[in-house]
Image (cartoon, coloured by chain):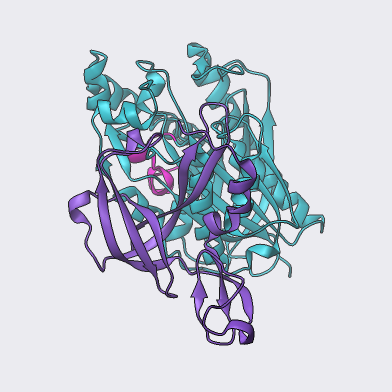
Amino acid sequence: MKHFGIVGYGAYVPRYRIKVEEIAKIWGKNPEDYKKGLLIREKSVPDVDEDAATIAVSASLNAIEMAGINPQELDAIYVGSESHPYAVKPTGTVVAEAIGATPNLTSADYEFACKAGTAAMQTCLGMVKGGMIKYGLAIGADTSQGRPGDALEYTAAAGGAAYIIGSENVMAEIEETCSFTTDTPDFWRRAGQEYPRHGARFTGEPAYFKHVLSATRMLLEKTGTTIDDYDYVVLHQPNGKFPLRAAKTLGVPKEKITPGLLVPEIGNTYSGASILGLAAVLDEAKEGDRILMTSFGSGAGSDSFSIRVIKKKENKHPVKSYVEKREYLNYGQYAKHRRKIRM
Amino acid sequence: MPHRKSLSLVWRRYPQRYQLIGSKCLTCGTHFFPPRDFCPKCRRKGEIVEQKMKGTGKIHSFTVVRVPQEGFEMEVPYVLAVVELDEGPKLTAQIISVKPDEVSIGMPVKMVFRRISEDGDSGIINYGYKFEKA
């Protein structure tokens, strides 16, 4: 039987971190409010020479290594990010050249706040199923920014994951996927603006919870499954509180959600967030395990996936190795890393 | 920021800067980086083909840059090294994710893909190889 799904995956998280205490100290806030309110301890920070393209390349090279394919076999590369280095010039072109996939392929950049990476996975899956391509590379990578002093500054982090989608040598089958999308003004960044804005009260109920819960319930209905049929559940994680609350509403026991919950230690990696969580779960899942993943992108939409591990492949660069490798920055160094200091 | 006048010059070097693509003489097996299209040993008997380097090697020599050239102010102090690739060729590259006093001659390194420089706020971003501790 032919399986369509993940042939290999790769993760990447920059090594630098800043603690909630360090940010709170600068803005005269109580760090405990954020640590308890957002369930986050620290977030990842990119190096001065890292951006969404370099993160995408690092994750993609890890994915290619696991898949054991020749990059020339990739017929499509889609990069999802809200921090593409160029406003006009696709990140996908830089990635394709750097991993040796050019010139016989199609590529485009995606933007859908935090769910652009899963949208790229759906596109690749559709193209593989339709017989248009042999292998597609779907990437979600971000070096997201929050306005200094804004609540988002405590969570906006950097990282990414890459998935090679195909129908040969599949390690995890994507059994089903579906989406839920509306026009919701919860978070946006206008053209030319450096920092995003958010419609504070829109963030929770009408945005995250409505979309995540609706897409997940739609998937369960479509597949005729219940939460009990899944060994792991990965939900988009803008902070630690939202996915845990959504999981509680869906009746997901804590032990099924925590393996894919990376946000307390690395922050919200935006387009990388749900798929880095999925990578962490794939690192520890056994053959036969079933995973439910639902992403969320402000604006707003959610993509839900039912995934079954069919053949375990070793990850030489596990998510854990990136999460554990950390070097702390003070706020001044962080401001330099994030180019908040004007020269 | 330094203005790179020649966009075509950096573009021509994408294969070597992005993927460490050099060349190799099939007659004597010598690797070249940057690529050469003529083998100085085999002369006319040489046969040159494109060859991608594995991206691993060791530090042959290094220096710590404290007074940077324009465009590298955010990175000082940084380590600039002559890296000897496993295939033999030596190249100059930045060593990252390491403090200057942690670097030593002979230290094994591997290539990473990073931003090197950019042509101001509106110009092209130059990406390429840097190395980190293997």
Q: In the image, is residue A253 part of the stretch drawn in magenta? A: yes
Indicate the chain coloured cyan by its letter. A
Question: Quick check: A134 above or below A232?
Answer: below
Q: Look at chain B in the picture and name its colour.
A: purple
Q: Would you say A334 lies left or right of A195 here?
A: left
Q: Would you say A276 lies left or right of B108 here?
A: right
Q: Nearer the viewer, residue A254 or A182?
A: A182
Q: Position of residue B132 (x, y in %)?
A: 35, 56
Residue span colored magenta: A251-268
What is the chief secondary structure element of the magenta stretch?
helix
Q: Position of residue A325 (x, y in %)?
A: 29, 50
Q: Position of residue A282 (x, y in %)?
A: 48, 57
Q: Would you say B98 lies left or right of A277 here?
A: left
Q: In the image, is residue A10 part of the stretch drawn in magenta? A: no
Question: Quick check: B16 above or below A80?
Answer: below
Where residue B133 sits, quadrant-wise, is bottom left
Question: Quick check: B23 above or below A234?
Answer: below
Regarding residue A183, the answer to whether it shows in the image is yes
Question: Quick check: B133 above or below A44?
Answer: below
